[in-house]
Image (cartoon, rainbow, N blue to C red):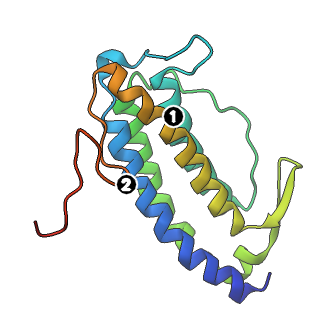
Amino acid sequence: MTPEQAAFFAETLLPQVQKEYLTTRRVLKAIPVAKESYRPHPDSRSALELAWHIASSDVWFLDGFLTGKFEMDDDSMPADLANTEDILALYEDSFESKLPQVSKLSPEFWATPRPFFGIYNNPTVLYLQFMLHHSIHHRGQLSAYLRPMGAKVPNIYGGSFDEPWTEPGS
């Protein structure tokens, strides 16, 4: 991949990363604090665990872009995060400070192949798409938890029963 091609992909994907972040925030905010331990099956993550996984993974990807390495030491939730409000605050602070830095990375950086857990060695820009798919996948899981927890499901890609979509200006 040439730097010009990588720049095109980065310029296309980075606004999507920002948009999905805003949607993820809405889903995280919808989790009822008193029901964060909800899990639909004993083998499922709890809503709190899933919220942490989504938020921390998004930030992990941004850190990987900024360091040029995708390595994971420990992905356990820090003990000082007690609820989804704490996770959301950390997510907002980290994401909003790191995405602008990631957006300034050079076309040459985006075109450079980087290893990913010994499975892939793709041009770095392709991991933006991987980041999007990962977040969207787990956010879909979490949004399916909301109604059984007694929460309202926010508009994600169109209206929901709880938050109908309307035409702009109507």
Q: Amino acid at mark 2?
A: Leu
What residue is at 58 percent from the left and 19 percent from the top? 44
Look at 42% across and 26% down and name the residue there: 145
Residue sitting at the far right = 118
Measured Cα–Cα span from mark 1 to mark 2: 17 Å
Instruction: Name, please, the residue furthest toward the top.
Output: 42
Residue linked to disc 1: 141
Residue 144 shows up from this direction: yes
Closer to the eye: label 1 or 2: 1
What is the x, y in percent for residue 11? 55, 79
Q: Residue furthest bottom?
A: 4
Could you say which quadrant of the image residue 124 lies in?
bottom right
The x, y position of residue 148, in whole percent, is: 36, 20
Q: Which residue is mark 2?
A: 22
Precedes in sequence: disc 1 or disc 2: 2
Which SS class for mark 2? Answer: helix
- Say if residue 104 shows up in the picture: no
Question: Within 10 angstroms of label 2, few (less than 14), some, or many (20 or more) residues?
Answer: few
Image-quadrant location for residue 28: top left
Q: State the residue in front, 22 or 141.
A: 141
Relative to 12, residue 67 above or below = above
Local packing at callout 1 (Cα closer than 10 Å; few below 14, some 14-19, many 20+) is some
When the figure is inspected, residue 17 is found, relative to residue 88, above or below; the finding is below
